[in-house]
Image (spheres, rainbow, N blue to C red):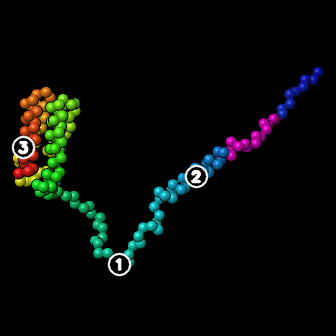
Amino acid sequence: MSEQQPEAVWVFPEKKKRGPRTALIVLMVVLVLIVAGVVALFLIPRGGETPAPTATPSESPSPSLSPTPSPSPSAPVTTPPPPADPDLPAFRDQVGFRLTTANQGLDLIAQGDDPQGTISKLQGDAQRLADAPPPSSIEKDWSTAVQEYMAALDALSRNPADSAALENARSAVSVLSTLLNP
């Protein structure tokens, strides 16, 4: 009785054909490489586009290896010059519209049309009046009058129905108008 020994047979799987999926992947890799090359061309500066150095010798000192001294902390700091002093007619043109709209806004408040919204807009305009640099001839009076106007608007915002606060705001606008039209 002889027993049969199992025989070892090597079985290799069939080779798969490359299908459309492989071709698509290869195509995408090629496209990515092309795009990367184009981007690199635009981002890398080219040597030919810089101006050529001139043949004339420069008289600039040669760079030294010693560090340059930093400015001392006690060095004077230069500040920009103050803005030019505007003349009164130019200043009137710049801020006159805000005073006209202030009178119209105070009329709306007296009528009861959205008093808080109108007061808020008038307060913004008052801040712009305060920020506008006035001519030196009226600077002190202008600043005081704008501050009084802002205080009158603040009082009016607490009680829009208060006729005394409304009249204070109107008189403050009148003072400002008088300063612009002496």
Image check: 104 left or right of 175? right
Q: Which residue is mark 3?
A: 175
Which SS class for mark 3?
Answer: helix
Question: Of tags 1 and 3, which is closer to the observer?
Answer: 3
Q: Is residue 75 above or below residue 26?
A: below
Q: CA distance from mark 1 to mark 2?
A: 44 Å
Which SS class for mark 1?
Answer: loop
Magenta stretch?
A: 10-23
In the rendered structure, does residue 14 fall within the stretch colored magenta? yes
Instruction: Give me the disc on residue 33.
Output: 2
Which corner quadrant of the image does residue 150 belong to? top left
Q: Is residue 160 above or below residue 53?
A: above
Q: Residue 75 in the image: x percent, y percent? A: 14, 57
- Mark 3 and mark 2 in contact (Cβ < 8 Å)? no
Q: Residue 144 in the image: x percent, y percent? A: 6, 43
Q: Amino acid at mark 3?
A: Val
Q: CA distance from mark 2 to mark 3?
A: 74 Å
Q: Which residue is mark 1?
A: 56
Q: Residue at x 14, y 40 (%)?
A: 103
Q: Residue 43 in the image: x percent, y percent? A: 47, 57
Which SS class for mark 2?
Answer: helix
Q: Quick one: quadrant of the N terminus?
A: top right
